[in-house]
Amino acid sequence: MVAGDKPLHSSSTPWQHKRPDHIGLRSFTHPYRDRTCTQGEAEEQLIGTSHAEIGAYLLGLWGIDSLVVEAVAHHHRPDRITHVDFDTTTAVYIADLLERTLDHSHDANETSLTETDEKVIEALGLSQQYPALRNRAMELFA
């Protein structure tokens, strides 16, 4: 699903650019803008949770299927749950990761991965496959 030229996921946080800084938000999101942490990590530092958990909570309240709720809840940190295979949560994580990294890089050799993302890819057993997935995404969408 898209809103304008951005995926709906990316369009769900326009408040980040328009809110006043009376609570010192810029100091919390600075590491995210500098790519030293993920958006979810910056949100957890600021409010103790992330948009992923908030979205999943709402989807659960609305009666959305548990596989979708789980994929949304863990789409930044799929290593927090057990995986049998390349499941829905892993697919959503990889799609989100590709969107984030391709959005910040125009060089096929530049990975733009945070330390957390590198650890997650390794924990999921995708270290060997990820470069090929990234290259294919660059061919299709760059």
Image (cartoon, rainbow, N blue to C red):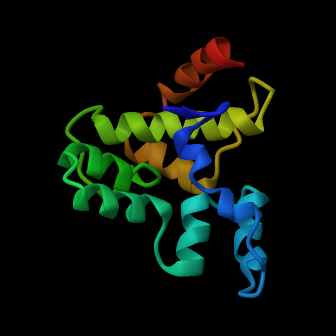
Give the image quarter of residue 7: top right
Q: Which residue is drawn at 77% across and 34% down?
A: 105
Give the image quarter of residue 107: top right
Above/below status of 31 relative to 124: below
Name the spot of residue 22 as percent of width and height, x first. 76, 87
Q: Residue at x 37, y 50 (%)?
A: 72
Is any part of residue 3 visible from this angle? yes
Is any part of residue 125 visible from this angle? no
Of residues 35 and 73, the one nearer the viewer is 73
User: Extreme top residue here?
Assistant: 139
Q: Which residue is drawn at 28% across and 51% down?
A: 69
The quarter of the image holding the C terminus is top right
In this image, 60 relative to 105: left or right? left
Above/below status of 23 relative to 141: below
Of residues 125 and 33, the one nearer the viewer is 33
Above/below status of 47 relative to 52: below
Label tally: 0
Name the spot of residue 35 as percent of width and height, x first. 73, 55
Name the spot of residue 46 as percent of width and height, x first. 60, 79
Name the spot of residue 28 as percent of width and height, x first. 70, 76
Q: Residue at x 56, y 66 (%)?
A: 41
